Amino acid sequence: MDFTYEKAGSFTQALKLKAEYKEKGVFIAGGTDLLVDIRNNILEPEAVIDISDLDEINYIRQEDNQVKIGAMTRIAQIEKSSIVHSHAPILYKASKDFANPLINNMATLGGNLINASPAADMATPLLVLGAKVVLKSANGERVIPLEELFSGVRKTNHRSDELLAEISFNGAQGKKCEFLKLGQRNGTSISIASLSLLFDIAGGVIGDDLRLAVGSVAPVPLRARKTEGVLRGVEPSARNIKLAGDMLKCEVTPITDVRGTAEYRMEMVAALLLMAFQNLGYTTK
Amino acid sequence: MNDIGIDKQKQTFYVVGKRRDGVDEKAKAAGNIIYADDFSMAGMLHAKVFRSTKASAKIKSLDTSAAKNLPGVVSVITAEDIPNNRSVTSTVGQVADIGLVGAVQQFVLAEDRVRFYGEPIALIAAEDLDTAEEALKLIEIEYEELPGVFDPEEAMKDGAPSVHEGSNVVAHWELRRGDVDKAFEEADVVVENAYQTQFHEHAHIEPESGVAWIDDESMVNLRVATQVIEQYREIAHILGIPESKVRIRGTLIGGGFGGKEDLTVEPYIALLSWKIGRPVKLTYEREEMMFGRHKRHPYKMYYKHGATKDGKLVAMEARLISDSGAYVYLSSWVLLYSTVHSTGPYYIPNIKVDSYSVSTNNIYTSAFRGFGAMQMTVAYESQMDILAEKLKMDPAELRARNYLNRGDENGTGQRIESEVLLPKTYEAALKALGDRTEPKAPYIKVGRGIANSWQSYGRMCYLHDTSSAWVGMEMDGSAVVRCGIPDLGGGQRESLRQITAELTGVPLENIHVISTDSQVTPLAGTVTATRALLMSGSATKLAAEAIRYDLLQKASEMLEEKPENIDLYNGEAFVRGNKEKKIPLAKVVRAIKGEGNPLEALKTFHAPGAEPVRKALLKGQIFPDFTFGSQAVEVEVNTLTGKVNVTKMVGAFDVGKAINPKRVEGQIEGGMTQGLGYALMEEFVEDKGIPMTTNLTTYIIPTSKDIPDIQSIIMESNSGKGPFGAKGIGEVTIAATAPAVLNAIYDAVGVWIKRIPTTPEVVFRHLKEFQEKA
Amino acid sequence: MKEITVQINDERITGLVKSSTTLLQFLRDKGFTEVKKGCGEGECGACTVLLNGKAVTSCLVLAVQADGSEVVTVKKKDDQLLETLKEAFVKHEALQCGFCTPGIIMTARWLLSENPKPNREEIRDALSGNLCRCTGYLKIIDAIEYVTRAER
């Protein structure tokens, strides 16, 4: 099944081409999801619009304490970035475990998010970082919280004439963070369940800004707000973490698929939560 | 030849036993090898296979006209276009049609029924691949679904849907010795458990592939990745032409593991090319490899052991049930191997084993490295550790009290004729684990497990296996070896080169091996059953020895020295201990050829033979010999998630004699890695015959991050039946990893898991159940 | 159909491709059969080449995307590090059937261009996108580590 290939020389041109083809045209960024979907007959586009070379949206910048990452930035670049290392170690961890070097060399941050898989590895770290995304169209741009981008399994809220241009978040230096991904093997895996945790702690008490997000256990990568409520302002004791885990199990709506049953996934979010705290040195006695 | 006692005469090994670099390896690293799909011919067409999307159905109607009419499509073939639409797998490579196999039908293309998802129904040949793929979509088919059966134990019951006709049990074997009932009554301890293994996929990185063409003499030619070039006979039979009119050239194979042992693309490309008159290429896509090609048999194994309080095994009873899938293929033989190996490498005075292979509408099952012996290790090595625990004995000690020794009889009454180094391999593996690793987190528990395995090498004796090889010297002192043996990456050809270099003195790089051509190279049989070194190695050794004899005789004249004092190495004949007295090999060769001796030898090696197996009760010598070894692993169990990570792996094997130690290590490391995948993560899943794991994203195999540095310990008893006392190593290395992991999980968390793979979820559920009981 | 020109090793190659033709297909159709197809979906790494210096799975790159680019395969001449890697692979028996080898050597080549002195863990991680069913990876890691020591 063939399609028309259009290379976008600029951001503006990309939007123009998309406006021409509408839903019959898809963007190709890293190609690591798109070409697999085409091979598996999940997508049959009439046109493929290549935005992978758009340097104008390939960058990692730090402005004051804000980190801005262009949508076409490759996962490998994120892994190597000193800005990401210092300002968002949780994102560094996610990029390191993303897939493998060959895929990471091609896959883009924007592609991973727009693909909107519930298992998107870059999503939960960005959710706990409170990331915003810039959606640009020919008519202007709007900025929305990342959380509002995901609307369902492989579904996003951006309009068909919009392109995801940038992801930004405030630096999280000095915060406790952990990213965990449970796969069927150590190598490249689609996660069975994943978890991102970010918090401050002072005087043995978790701060009010603790954030928690989980992947592969709901139609979208999920900010677990109720569980956050259980953990904020309390000590990271075994009892509190257990209570939080129980709440987390209620917040998620996993499915059964070839990688695991719904029941197991539900148990795993609680398990990963405890693991995250223990990795950070809490309740290890 | 024995005048100068070849074996005694060879005092020093210059090439055999050394870590020599391979000629083939150099070409492979350079990217020069032309694998099956790398080959193209002018005017070549591309083929595709149209496959069933139902697990059990009648074909009500099949309309290929739209496909045929697509521009660029040259031919569409269905069953009615095939002269003999039966593929026979009874005695691959052999002449005699014996054994309990071959009775059940197998089709090249489905006729009026399909019995598994993925069953081939039609063939398309088109000018290019895209057109062939388009044509697939244009074939119109109507199915009428029929009841299917998807569990072998269900399929054995009365009233289960018949996959073929009548009973679904397609094979049955027995072991009997002594009186198990009495022995169990008298035993101090009895351990009884059921074990389950899964469908396992070969996942060789190279897809099945080949090209067929009709040459200017109207010969059917195939150039194909195959472990068995003797299948030219099957192709001839399918086409209804004489066997002498089909020629198969086997390529260097990009991984086989038994996946390229049965017919793969051969009948399809042969049929299309023969019908059309143009070359045809067929290469499978990864998805169709997953759902359309055979798998390792899942087994349900019911085991019962009885022992004295001193740890002497007194009885063993087992019931083994394998899933043969939709077509029999090699299920009966795999079951035979299972039955013989089911006791483990232990002497047991009272034995009762009954095994059954049962048809279902699942993917069909056939050969895979280990060939039925492998699944048994999961059962018997778990049983041994469970027994040891019940007896409060060290597992090493329990085993040591029961090992088969040289001279003992195994479960069929076959005497073990070679050394059994198991106590040594077990201890070496244990020792090499070193100090126990400290758990790196509070939720991690560390455990260690060791398991033994034994595996036959050489095919079943009743097949009267033979292998031939030709060695010839060139005028300039270089040499050519011609041998039909295929090479699937285990260094089969390199072994022949090394053996020839050792015996003739020709430098390794000056020996050309021409192999794997059914009409040009002497037939050497299959590269299966860990037979290549035993058979083709021995045949080559015989031929090279004959050459050596002539060389030594002539060199003796020319150097005026007794032949027993002369050795051959590095292109020279020289007197031992006297560096000055030497002569270039080329001179010796010219002298010999000048007298009318062409200095070439064609020899056939015969494996030990035996009477045909005509009854279910297996008795006597079934196999030429066995290889023994042990594996040890250390694992980390994440008690929160159930994920098992292997931190240490050791394999210790007695290979008789290592022709090239680094290749032996490669077999140990590669086999154990494949075994680890089998233990932890690999499972081909079908839901009522519909495949769920259809690519390498959903069927996952170990990556570099899943395997620790493996330690290989090579032991050499020099007692094997292969060249220079070698045993075979290819299969035994895959078997014991799974039980070693199961034993290690028990050591870590106190839970016996009796099924594989031990995925995180499986381990988690076992842990949860265990905690809830406590 | 579109005409593309790609620098492949030491040659400039021009060809007509469909939009959906992958770089892998283009390379193999043009005779660079050392680049292997194992799965077609970026899972096995057998198709690994260097694309403008980066190791990628060529089955997930459209040929048209490689127009004007540089592709390097295992047959590139005059690359001493590449030759050293091949020799090390042979010496260490870092291959058996050899089918995954061209891809793995390109990943190794890329790794050493990014990180001339990787430790064993870094080598192991770098290889995680290349599947090998024969060797168990140990000797591959040994071979690459040997090259890093040799280059010292």
Image (cartoon, grey):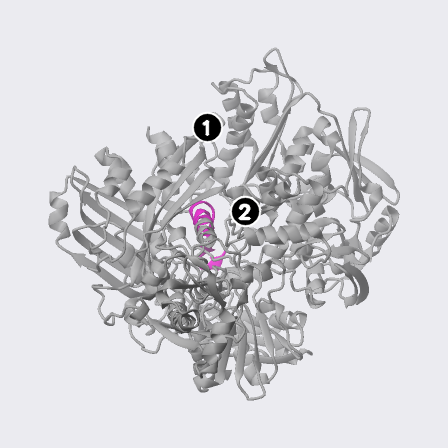
User: Does residue B689 show up magenta in the picture?
Assistant: yes
Q: Mark 2 points at which residue?
A: B703
Q: Is residue B148 visible?
A: no
Give the number of the disc on residue B44. none
Q: Which residue is drawn at 46% across and 71% down?
A: B263
Q: Residue furthest top?
A: A203
Residue kind at label 1, given as amino acid type? Pro
Residue B273: x and y in percent read 57, 81
Q: In the image, is C23 to the left or to the right of B222?
A: right
Subunit that carries the residue with mark 2 = B
Give the number of the disc on residue B439. 1
Quarter of the figure that contains the C terminus of chain B: top left
Say what secondary structure mark 1 lies in: loop
Rendered image quadrant of residue A199: top right
The magenta segment = B670-691
Rendered image quadrant of residue B190: top left
